[in-house]
Amino acid sequence: MDEQMIITGVSDGVATVTMNRPDRHNAFDETLIAALTEVIGTLGSDPAVRAIVLRGAGKSFSAGGDLGWMRRMADYGEAQNLDDARRLEALMRTLDGVAKPTIAAVQGPAYGGGVGLVACCDIAIASDNAKFVLSEVKLGLVPAVISPYVIAAIGARAARRYFLTAETFSALEAHRLGLVHEVVPGHMLDAAVAKVAAALAANGPGAIARCKALITGVTTLPKADLPEFTARAIAEARASAEGREGVGAFLEKRPPRW
């Protein structure tokens, strides 16, 4: 992993992953894509990590695809382009599916694939000066691998506008659409993120992972499968060591030990 492109740190169970290409507005190329995929996977399997915060260094969250990377891709054949696209898809899938809760701290512009990163995180908090654009059509491209996550966040109707127009929209509009959960003044972003991260870190880590799997199941399984799926989900949680500890701690009026 290229340590200069990614800065990580863990404090009180909260891991912070910072994309560190401020001179390029944290645009990603094949190296940053590989580094992010690796570090998110590693943190996802670390029992000491209770939550992951994703942020960008400098003025921008992420400008999406790096221009130099896109120039190289233009010279690739179809097979090379497909391999490259699969690696970007793997990053989005890894971020979306990691068992640990994730927070996007959006302090500035998020363009193209940067919007995809925001949509893949469980929670997104933006400063009031952040802005967003799904800019692919301006380059004759499509927001393909990020589309499942962005559409899940903003809905197909809003995607019909913003995928097709490549208009820039504000943090308040991103909040209205459901892309971000909270908008705060820039000087309050760190505190807002820390507050949510602390709340996540205090909850049962197994229960959080089960909740993420629950949401995926409920939104993707056939309706006929949901009664058994949800019954099994609560039964397994109740029977788990963490579930027994959580209920016991509540009844005994003490903090849970996890």
Image (cartoon, rainbow, N blue to C red):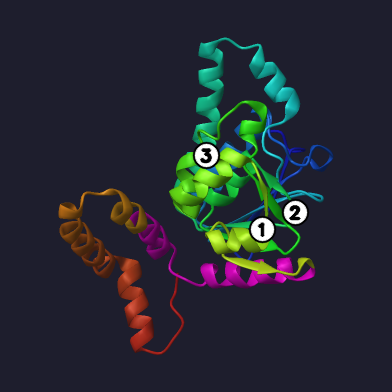
Which amino acid type corresponds to the residue marked 2 in the rendered image?
Answer: Gly
Q: Position of residue 149 (x, y in %)?
A: 48, 46
Q: CA distance from mark 1 to mark 2?
A: 9 Å
Is residue 212 found inside the magenta-colored segment of the image?
yes
Q: Which mark is residue 213?
A: none
Residue under label 3, please give it. Answer: 146
Q: Position of residue 158 (x, y in %)?
A: 51, 51
Segment colored magenta: 187-213
Q: Secondary structure at mark 1?
A: strand
The residue lying at 32 percent from left, 71 percent from top is: 243
190 with respect to 154 (left or right): right
The residue lying at 26 percent from left, 70 percent from top is: 238
Residue under label 1, please give it. Answer: 105
Residue 232 found in image quarter: bottom left
Is residue 55 found inside the magenta-colored segment of the image?
no
Q: Which mark is residue 108?
A: 2
- Eye-nearest disc, 1 or 2: 2
**Is the C-beta separation of discs 2 and 3 under 8 Å?**
no
Within 10 angstroms of label 2, few (less than 14), some, or many (20 or more) residues?
Answer: many
The residue lying at 78 percent from left, 41 percent from top is: 25
